[in-house]
Image: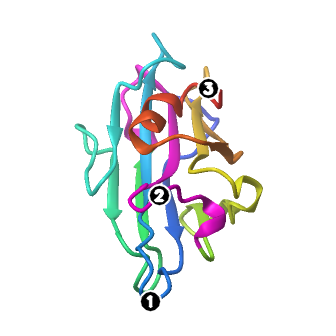
């Protein structure tokens, strides 16, 4: 599709958090992306990208996957090449799920959580999850393809109180 309206093309979502205190169970946060087609833009995702994986067509890649929050730079990073997504895909939702390994863990239990969404050197959005401190998962970005083919970001952070497998099914529908 040819258009003079240039939308988002290649976007990175970077997630960071501090490791758990010594002796405490580790905090494992995971980036998850769900793709939706024009036939069902708010239903079941066509596919998910999570846990050190990539999309079938290579347009969405989880480049870095941490299970502890240790290390320099982002603990998790995902690249979305929106301009390469096939025309049937009209919506991509990106979220963060906390693995529930040692009882219920919320964003308020994890120190210094931070998500940043950027395109090249341009910061598009960022959040510290303080608005969803009582949640166990959250959507952090919704990318929507407009009628002209240009991708736009709707960057509201929305909290969910659910475990990771359910979150992957629910994240594109919005909170219940």
Comparing labels 2 and 1, the label whose residue is closer to the camera: 2
Residue under numbered circle 2: 103
Q: Which residues are magenta?
A: 82-110
- Residue 154 versus residue 109 in the image, above or below: above
- N-terminal-most mark, 1 or 3: 1
Comparing labels 1 and 3, the label whose residue is closer to the camera: 1
Quadrant of the frame with the C terminus? top right
Residue under numbered circle 1: 22
Q: What mark, if any, has residue 146 been given in the picture?
A: 3
Callout 2: helix, strand or loop? loop
Judge from the rendering whether residue 76 lies leftward or rightward of residue 94; answer left or right.
left
Residue 7 appears in the figure: no
Judge from the rendering whether residue 20 lies leftward or rightward of residue 65; answer left or right.
right
Is 86 magenta? The answer is yes
Name the image quarter holding residue 152.
top right
Is 29 magenta? The answer is no
Q: Residues within 10 Å of mark 3 (few under 14, many from 20)?
A: few
Judge from the rendering whether residue 156 lies leftward or rightward of residue 164; answer left or right.
right
- N-terminal-most mark, 3 or 2: 2
Cα gap from disc 1 to disc 3, whole angstroms: 47 Å
Cα gap from disc 2 to disc 1, whole angstroms: 17 Å
Q: From the viewer's side, name the closer residue of 111 and 9.
A: 111
- Residue 139 versus residue 79 in the image, above or below: above
């Amino acid at each position: 599709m040819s258009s003079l309206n240039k939308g988002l093309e290649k976007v990175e979502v970077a997630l960071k958090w501090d490791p758990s205190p010594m002796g405490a169970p580790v905090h494992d946060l995971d980036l998850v992306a769900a793709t939706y087609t024009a036939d069902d833009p708010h239903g079941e995702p066509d596919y998910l990208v999570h846990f050190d994986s990539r999309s079938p067509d290579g347009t969405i890649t989880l480049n870095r996957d941490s299970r502890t929050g240790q290390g320099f730079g982002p603990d998790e990073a995902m690249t979305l090449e929106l301009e390469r997504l096939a025309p049937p895909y009209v919506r991509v939702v990106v979220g963060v799920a906390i693995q529930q390994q040692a009882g219920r863990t919320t964003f308020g239990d994890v120190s210094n959580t931070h998500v940043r969404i950027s395109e090249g050197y341009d910061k598009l959005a960022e959040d510290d999850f303080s608005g969803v401190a009582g949640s166990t998962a959250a959507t952090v970005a919704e990318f929507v393809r407009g009628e002209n083919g240009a991708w736009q970001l709707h960057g509201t952070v929305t909290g969910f109180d659910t475990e990771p497998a359910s979150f992957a099914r629910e994240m594109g529908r919005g909170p219940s």
